[in-house]
Image (cartoon, rainbow, N blue to C red):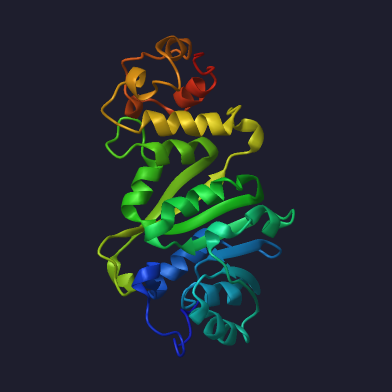
Amino acid sequence: MSAAPPETGFGRAKKALGQHFLHERGVIDRILHALDPRPGERIVEIGPGQGALTFPLLRAHGELTVIEFDRDLIAPLTAAAAPLGRLEIVHRDVLQVDFTALAAGAPLRLVGNLPYNISSPILFHALAHADAVRDMHFMLQKEVVDRMAAAPGSKVYGRLSVMLQAWCEVTPLFTVAPGAFRPPPKVDSAVVRLVPRPRGTVAIADPARFALVVRAAFGQRRKTLRNALSGVLDAEGIRRAGLDPGARAEQLAVADFVALADQPAPQD
């Protein structure tokens, strides 16, 4: 599959929007191979930019929905896509897009080179609509992907690791060097696959309580659970979850956080 057509009319990347446009054909083809689009699937690209992935996807799949915030990219994307397939453009901030409504009962496959300055909020927003998402293939800063897939005990294991792994299977796929983008970022990137777990297999009774416990536990990494969870869960509750109040959050598996969230909050 070829890369994007000439970039006539697209203009320069905007630093304020965290834009780094992918252009290397080999990387584009590897993403398409990982995605492996099939007829009838509902594919949604977040941040198509100058269409480096958009246009090969259209050629391969025939139809595509994209979410683009930059008004200046709408017209050139529309014009370049016209001969390739049916492109639906949602001109909105992705954090304001209701993926569940967009899916309309047909699970979405999300793909995109996410703006690095808001990648974590986008991930949490997609997570809130996990029931409407079949899978996600995202390009992110490699440091973020390392955090997403980290195991307990790792220096980069934290809130992002636990929250994503609780709801999704997280699989790092490959690393991408800065030269694959225009302008090149100052860091390596990586492509990751996230597959939401079937709702019946996620043992989290109260998602809001779970999120609160995880946020508090990692709020100050050097604190013990007894101190970090003060006001959220007392020492006795931590022991009922089968854990040592003197342990630290980075030592706990995802299942341990589920057990903590199952304990009632202390009474005043």
Front residue (pair 5, 214):
214
Q: Residue at x 44, y 61 (%)?
A: 114
Q: Residue at x 49, y 54 (%)?
A: 122
Residue 32 in percent (x, y) is at: 51, 66
Residue 39 in percent (x, y) is at: 69, 65
Q: Is residue 19 visible?
A: no
Q: Is residue 262 above or below residue 61?
A: above
Q: Is residue 115 visible?
A: yes
Name of the residue lying farthest toward the bottom: 8
Q: Is residue 18 above or below residue 76?
A: above
Name of the residue lying farthest toward the right: 105
Front residue (pair 171, 254):
254
Residue 100 in percent (x, y) is at: 67, 52
Residue 181: image quadrant is bottom left
Name of the residue lying farthest toward the front: 268
Describe residue 173's horizontal placement relative to residue 155 as left or right: right
Front residue (pair 122, 134):
122
